[in-house]
Image: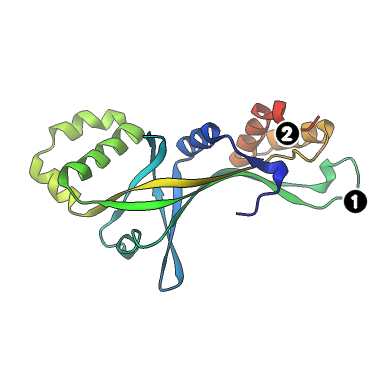
């Protein structure tokens, strides 16, 4: 993605933390020159120095058939908000949008062994619904196999991370404060979330 240098974060640890917090991503691949995408939850782990993204498609989703052919892109994004020029010190300014986003590029591997598919399902239960694990453990093997037969499990080894934090770093501290306060007063949850994100990162912003 296009990232002006002032918004370009090279902090891989923070990027992984962001992906884990906002783990409902968009996986994008290409089929016959046409981009295709699916919205999926991901489990983010690290293995032998690589970031690993794990998830699964519904078996009926044709995107699962081509993910091993070319490089894959997964987009993670969540807090974002419109920023009005009225919040800047000078009138000669333009509207913009603040946001945080991670683009993860990598190679995909379909997991075909039954034990691997079960491991993916259990990873997701532990990540998203740990209280369900006891119920999962009580299910019959036959039921689990029928469940597993309806999905295509996969993992992506990330080879490149792009991490953009567009948080008004190019504005004065006074302007940043006005933007944060304005967002905190919003009735939209995403605005408030972005304001809190800006406050946490404020020590990194331009004074």
Horizontal and vertical percent position of residue 147? 18, 48
The picture quadrant where one finds residue 81 is top right
Q: Residue furthest bottom?
A: 32
Q: Which of 125 and 76 is in front in this view?
A: 76
Residue neighbourhood size for the residue with mark 1, other residues' Cα within 10 Å, grouped as few (<14), some (14–19), many (≥20): few
**Residue denoted by label 1:** 92
The picture quadrant where one finds residue 8 is top right
Task: Name the residue: 69% across, 33% down.
Answer: 184
The picture quadrant where one finds residue 14 is top right
Q: Do the residues labelled 1 and 2 touch (CB within 8 Å)?
A: no
Task: Name the residue: 20% across, 28% down.
Answer: 134
Horizontal and vertical percent position of residue 22? 49, 40
Q: Nearer the viewer, residue 136 or 44?
A: 44
Q: Earlier in the sequence, mark 1 or mark 2?
A: 1
Q: How far apart are marks 1 and 2 (CA)?
A: 20 Å
Q: Residue furthest front?
A: 48
Task: Name the residue: 91% across, 44% down.
Answer: 90
Q: Nearer the viewer, residue 34 or 140?
A: 34
Horizontal side, residue 140 vs residue 56: left or right: left
Please identify the quadrant where the N terminus is shown: bottom right
Residue 180, numbered circle: 2
Task: Name the residue: 49% across, 36% down.
Answer: 16
Q: Which of 81 and 8 is in front in this view?
A: 8
């Amino acid at each position: 993605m296009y990232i002006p240098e002032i918004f370009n974060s090279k902090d891989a640890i923070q990027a992984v933390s962001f992906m884990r917090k906002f783990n409902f991503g968009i996986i994008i691949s290409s089929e016959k020159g046409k981009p295709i995408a699916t919205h999926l939850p991901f489990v983010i782990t690290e293995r032998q120095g690589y970031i690993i993204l794990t998830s699964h498609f519904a078996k009926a989703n044709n995107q699962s058939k081509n993910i091993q052919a070319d490089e894959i892109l997964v987009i993670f994004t969540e807090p974002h908000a419109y920023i009005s020029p009225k919040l800047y010190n000078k009138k000669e300014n333009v509207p913009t949008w603040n946001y945080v986003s991670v683009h993860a590029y990598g190679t995909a591997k379909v997991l075909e062994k039954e034990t691997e598919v079960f491991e993916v399902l259990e990873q997701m239960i532990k990540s998203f619904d740990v209280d369900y694990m006891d119920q999962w453990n009580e299910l019959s093997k036959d039921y689990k196999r029928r469940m597993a037969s309806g999905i295509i499990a996969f993992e992506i080894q990330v080879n490149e991370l792009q991490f953009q934090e567009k948080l008004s770093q190019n504005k004065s501290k006074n302007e940043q404060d006005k933007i944060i306060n304005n967002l905190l007063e919003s009735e939209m949850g995403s605005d408030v979330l972005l304001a809190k994100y800006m406050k946490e990162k404020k020590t990194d912003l331009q004074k």
